[in-house]
Amino acid sequence: MGVNTKAIKTRIKSVKNTKKITKAMEMVAAAKMRRSVEATLNTRMYARLARELMGHLSLMEERESGLLACRPVKKLLVVLVSSNRGLCGSFNSNLFKKTATVLRDTDIGRHRRVNGDADILPEGPIEIDVVGVGRRSASFAKKNGYNLVAAFDALPERLQYEDILPITNLIISSFREKTYDKVVVAFTEYESSIVQTPKLRQLLPISAIDIDKMLAKFDTENKKRIDHPLPEDELVEIENYTFEPSVEDIAEVVLPRLVEVQLYQAILESAASEHSARMVAMKNASDAASDMISGLTLQYNKGRQAAITQEISEIVGGASALE
Amino acid sequence: MIKFKIVTPYGVTYDDTIEKVTIPTQAGEITVLENHTPLVSILAAGELIIYKEGYSTGIAISGGFFEIRPNSEVYIMADTAEHGTEIDIERAEAAQKRAEELLRQVQSAEDVDYARLQAAIEKELVRISVGRKYKNVGGGQ
């Protein structure tokens, strides 16, 4: 027999099993993706109201206190949101590539100003530290020679708001202690189930532009606010506001929440992106398996056919030899 | 009527027009009626009571902040918010016991942990009391 049909048969079987697995993983990823997207959307309302409230607060107090302080950047902290598991295509490598490029850019040390004041530039070379979210982030820090301050790799699949508090507490306290002068988050933004883009956003000092960018994604109303920070009539109304007990006390409660909600969103979006990247990767794998199965089946049938033809000609040859 | 919303990081818990609302703040409870002066303040863990068409609904909240805007709009930004009838009292009690147990262990540990646990206990106590109050409303009547 020319072709080993038995070997092909076992191969078909194993490829079929693999396909079953990849298909199942694809479906699971799709369901998880939907859940993450839903959670992202649920948080949006909270984020928006908190952002509007911050707008009201910042009119009342000077901008340079606490979590709003723009200091010349000496040390920068990057919160890198990667995945815990593999099999998600180029999800992590895209994020790492983007982060590495941006971090090498000297622009990262600059504070952008909203109202056209001069930018605050770093005084010297900046040091960069990394806080990793997800197991894969450690390898990024190692490869690029950044100091890994902390790694949070045990976040649950169904992320709760409380789960990210250890991370925000860490970054907020180290920002207050002036260990870091700027904190950014690197994550993968979820645009659709096909398009996901790695992004970096500023967490601290709290930047209204970055929060608005986050909010603008799903509604057009907010896009306007980026161009026109606050309409005139709202400026007048704000004079009538009462703040209890005081603006500072309220800022103490509201501002950390804004950092939390931004990071929460970033991690949820990353999860949505990860699942959709995995879904696509698994779909490709399932398709490749289908192709392989049909190729192998063809090969198997050809082999079988050849064997039958050969057997018949042998029988015919044997019979004619007897006559 | 007041345009009233409770939002948490998990989504919008309550969205309706109501007659009045009693809000637990750090300086004590306040009741908000129509055309209240614009106000921003901090929430305390406690029971928020919504009055509408002669009925009242209790909602257990665990801190956060709120804003009263001109034109009778009230937005509550709570860390968590639960309807009285949704609270599982047994689980809330278990959670409170757990937090108290932990608190005993970390007496000596860092202040941060201590404060966090105390907040957790406070939150569970509120949930229990609000849950008890509305225990019979859902099934009974």
Image: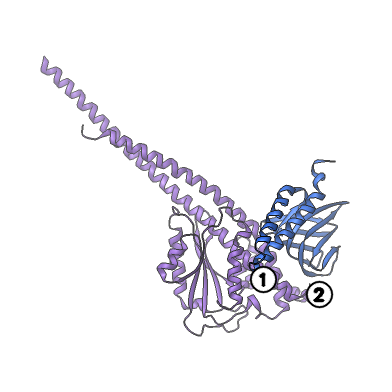
The image shows residue A86 at horizontal and vertical percentages of 44, 54
In this image, A322 relative to B31: left or right? left
Residue at the image position 47 percent from the left and 63 percent from the top:
A137
Task: Please tell me whether mark 2 sits on a helix, a strand or a loop.
Answer: helix
Vertical order, A202 against B94 (above or below) = below
Tell me which amino acid carries mark 2: Asn
Residue at the image position 58 percent from the left and 84 percent from the top:
A118
Distance between the Cα atoms at labels 1 and 2?
22 Å
The chain ID associated with circle 1 is A
Which chain corresponds to the colour blue?
B
Which residue does the numbered mark 2 point to in the structure image?
A: A240
In this image, A16 relative to A175: left or right? left
Mark number, residue A168: none
Q: Nearer the viewer, residue B11 or A137?
A: A137
Task: Please tell me whether mark 1 sits on a helix, a strand or a loop.
Answer: helix
The image shows residue A297 at horizontal and vertical percentages of 33, 36
Task: Name the colour assigned to chain A in the rendering.
Answer: purple
Q: Quadrant of the N terminus of chain B?
A: bottom right
Which residue does the numbered mark 1 point to in the structure image?
A: A255
The image shows residue B110 at horizontal and vertical percentages of 63, 68
The scheme the figure's colours follow is by chain
Looking at this rendering, what residue extends furthest in the right direction? B54
The image shows residue A176 at horizontal and vertical percentages of 61, 76
Q: Nearer the viewer, residue A177 or B24?
A: A177
Vertical order, B77 against A317 (above or below) = below
Tell me which amino acid carries mark 1: Leu
